[in-house]
Amino acid sequence: MGDMLNVRAIRRIDDGVLGPGVRVGVWFQGCSIGCPGCMVPELQPAVPYELVDSVTLFERVMDMSGDAREVSISGGEPFEQPVGAMGEFLGMLKDNGFGIWIYSGYTLDELAAKGRDAEIALADCIVDGRYRRELDDGAPLRGSSNQRVIMISDRYSGARFPGTRKMQFSVERDGVSMVGIPPVGFWDRFRERIRKF
């Protein structure tokens, strides 16, 4: 069966939240980078959450996608997942017409040095680099100004990009989930408003 991918969540995402178009989001568990101010520190520990093979993960994305053929991949750190399984997963997405948008805390040069060139070549866009709280300028689709939105292919050349950050909230049986990159100061304002209720 090969290496397993450590999946934390799969969700359908509204247009402009983590890339252009309605899409499916895949979050992986585990990140050794540990950026201060990380939005989802609970995804940092490299502990098993839900281990699945690349075929199963692809089938789950297909089941959730409907007519959407876009996927955003984040974490945790996607490029700390096993090379073979991640490459197979991305290859299946590409073979089935998905646009692939990946968020990584590593730079493209670091990924190349780690031998991840084949996976990079399958992506259509990679947002690279560490999140740096002091450089969070509120721009859409990335967390801080040092991070680059790098188009690997021309898939998104005619895409409409949001002018501001967008977020998506879902109320579920076991709580509330939030997808997206929050604006600067969001959590302070959110906590203040909750206190007023």
Image: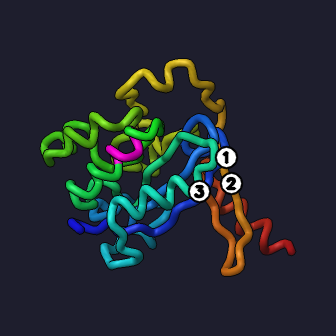
Residue type at numbered disc 2: Gln
Badge number at residue 14: 1
Q: How many marks?
A: 3
Task: Identify which residue, 144 or 175, lies in the foreground.
Answer: 175
Reply above or below: 57 against 167: below
- Image-based side of 85 in relation to 188, left or right: left
Give the Cα separation between the discs numbered 1 and 2: 7 Å
The C terminus appears in which quarter of the rendering?
A: bottom right
The N terminus appears in which quarter of the rendering?
A: bottom left
Q: At 38% from the left edge and 39% from the top edge, which residue is drawn? A: 95
Q: Which residue is mark 3?
A: 64
Badge number at residue 63: none
- Image-based side of 109 in relation to 150, left or right: left
- Identify the image quadrant of residue 189: bottom right
- Contact? badges 2 and 3 (CB < 8 Å): no
Task: Identify which residue, 161 or 71, lies in the foreground.
Answer: 71
Reply above or below: 161 against 174: above
Q: Nearer the viewer, mark 2 or mark 3?
A: 3
SS type, badge 2: strand
Residue 159, horizontal then vertical, whole percent: 58, 24
Q: Which residue is mark 2?
A: 168
Give the Cα separation between the discs numbered 2 and 3: 17 Å
> In terms of sequence position, does the residue under pointer 1 or pointer 3 come before the other?
1
> In terms of sequence position, does the residue under pointer 1 or pointer 2 come before the other?
1
Q: Residues within 10 Å of mark 3 (few under 14, many from 20)?
A: some
- Image-based side of 115 in relation to 92, left or right: left
Stretch in magenta = 90-94
Q: How is the image coloured?
A: rainbow
Q: At 61% from the left edge and 54% from the top edge, which residue is drawn? A: 12
As drawn, the residue found furthest toward the top would be 158
Residue type at numbered disc 1: Asp
